[in-house]
Image (spheres, rainbow, N blue to C red):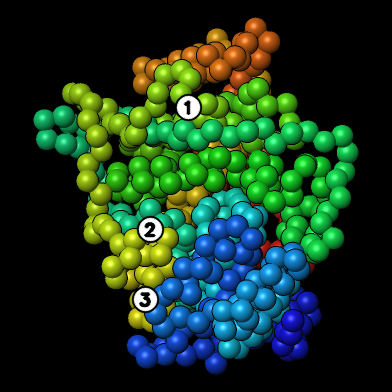
Amino acid sequence: MKSLSRRSFLRTSSLGLGAAVGLSPWAKVLGANDDLRLAVVGFRGQGGLHLRLLRELPGVRVVALCDADRAVLERGVAEATRLGQPVEGYVDVRKLLENKDIDAITTATPDHWHCLVTVWACQAGKDVYVEKPLSHNIFEGRKSVEAADKYNRIVQWGNQSHGHRTGPPHLERDGLGRIRVVWTSLNRMRQSIGRVDGPQPVPSSLDYDLWTGPAPLQPLTRRNLHYDWHWVWPTGTGEIGNNGIYQLDAARLRLGLNTLPRRVMSLGGRFLFDDDGETPNTQIALFQYDPGPLLIFEVRNLPSEQGPKTAGTKARYERGDAGLPNPVGPEGSQGGFGGHKGHLFNFVSAVRSRRVSDLRAPLIEGHLSSALVHMANISYRLGTPKSVAAAREAVQDQGSEAVEVFDGFREHLAVNGVDFDKTQVVVGPWLEMDPDTERFVGPENLVGPANELARGHYRPPFVVPDVV
């Protein structure tokens, strides 16, 4: 595998990629007859789908691959050669971004790398398609938006279900009045990831320092390095960030809400799983917008066929229940493609046109929806174990709908064998958010820890800077 030996990004200071390579003077505006030269960063899982679909799109050439696991990388390079589409291979994304022959990248790394790859790529003059969730914390989402704006990059977040633009809030309906409450849910069964009795061996082919990147460099203390990173806080965002973000994004868009909620509270637990996972497998999140509505979201990872069903998205108006109003803006695939392929095609089209307005999922939308995930998880992580009765009492002031959801949550757990005489529910505090500054406000005993989780800590040189 060869890689270009241009000056090292390691000699730049704290993500000084813009200073190191400038604003990519070699980057050109592509014409309709020019091939777009792409690289895929992180392709063991979802990135493998990126790679396959990009090869099916007209006018696109995949010219480079990057993965911190040399075994994965070597397989990808060999496969490309077999297909007659040779690529350059990189273990370190910083080296890949020095390559002047790459116009854009797609990235499907673990969550804790999403922002850093996006910011670095923008600074290096590359356009970016970044998987959901956009970020690993609230601060990162805003920094990604700022980087795309500052360096005039086309950046799409990878929620292929996102096909609508926000507009005026649809909080009223003729004959029903204003929406008071909206609730939606995710049912997806998961198995325990097991428990180990000490540090585990890291695959010999993996550059663990690079894979860990901005997260703390700690021994591997779970059975599977890959995928199960979703269920530990240094690298993942739990099921709410893995798949729940689809429903949260859809509900926010259909309500036309283009700001963060004023308050958040979350409760739940990792029930029945005595394993090395940290994120909840059953969770309720309450988001109170100003002046409304209350958005309730529920995650269930235990068998969905047991206990009361949670079906779709519902809204309760002042004078009755109904579905949410139709979304704002056009829906559907672009260029005759649907799903993931359509989303990537849309990204390619926007890269060619250089119009951010052509994107189906602009970066700001990814930030607003990903921030809901982080707000809920921050409340949960600051929570304390309480009895089921005390947990129910904690949501009662939010009205009958919140109590109704909690009672379904409790019944679902009970029929799955949770004994509440022996098991408690983690109940997070109500946290107040200033939507303008995107920082928590209120009592210092809550604000300090909450804003620390909203900001994150980074391991040099993998630092997301305050000024991108």
Task: Calculate the distance from the C-alpha at mark 3 to the C-alpha at mark 1.
Answer: 39 Å
Q: Quadrant of residue 113?
A: bottom right
Residue contact at pointers 3 and 2, CB within 8 angstroms: no
The disc labelled 3 sits on which kind of residue?
Ser
The disc labelled 2 sits on which kind of residue?
Gly
Q: Which residue is drawn at the image coordinates 74% and 54% (left, top)?
A: 215
Res. 47 visible in picture: yes
- Is 30 displayed left or right of 428 in the figure? left
x, y (%) of residue 263? 47, 35
69 relative to 31, above or below: above
Q: Secondary structure at mark 1?
A: loop
x, y (%) of residue 313? 33, 34
**Mark sitting earlier along the chain (2/1):** 1
Q: Which mark is residue 339?
A: 2
233 relative to 212, above or below: above
- Is 300 displayed left or right of 250 in the figure? right
The disc labelled 1 sits on which kind of residue?
Ser
Q: Secondary structure at mark 2?
A: helix
Q: Counting other residues with Cα less than 10 Å from the Cα at mark 1, is it few (<14), some (14-19), or many (20 or more)?
A: some
**Mark sitting earlier along the chain (3/1):** 1
Q: Quadrant of the C terminus?
A: bottom right
- Is 356 displayed left or right of 464 in the figure? left
Q: Which residue is drawn at the image coordinates 51% and 30% (left, top)?
A: 300
* Depth order, front residue of 77/320: 77
Q: Which residue is drawn at the image coordinates 29% and 71% (left, top)?
A: 335
* Depth order, front residue of 401/196: 196
Residue at the spot of label 1: 304
Q: Secondary structure at mark 3?
A: helix
Q: Which mark is residue 349?
A: 3
Front: mark 3 or 2: 2
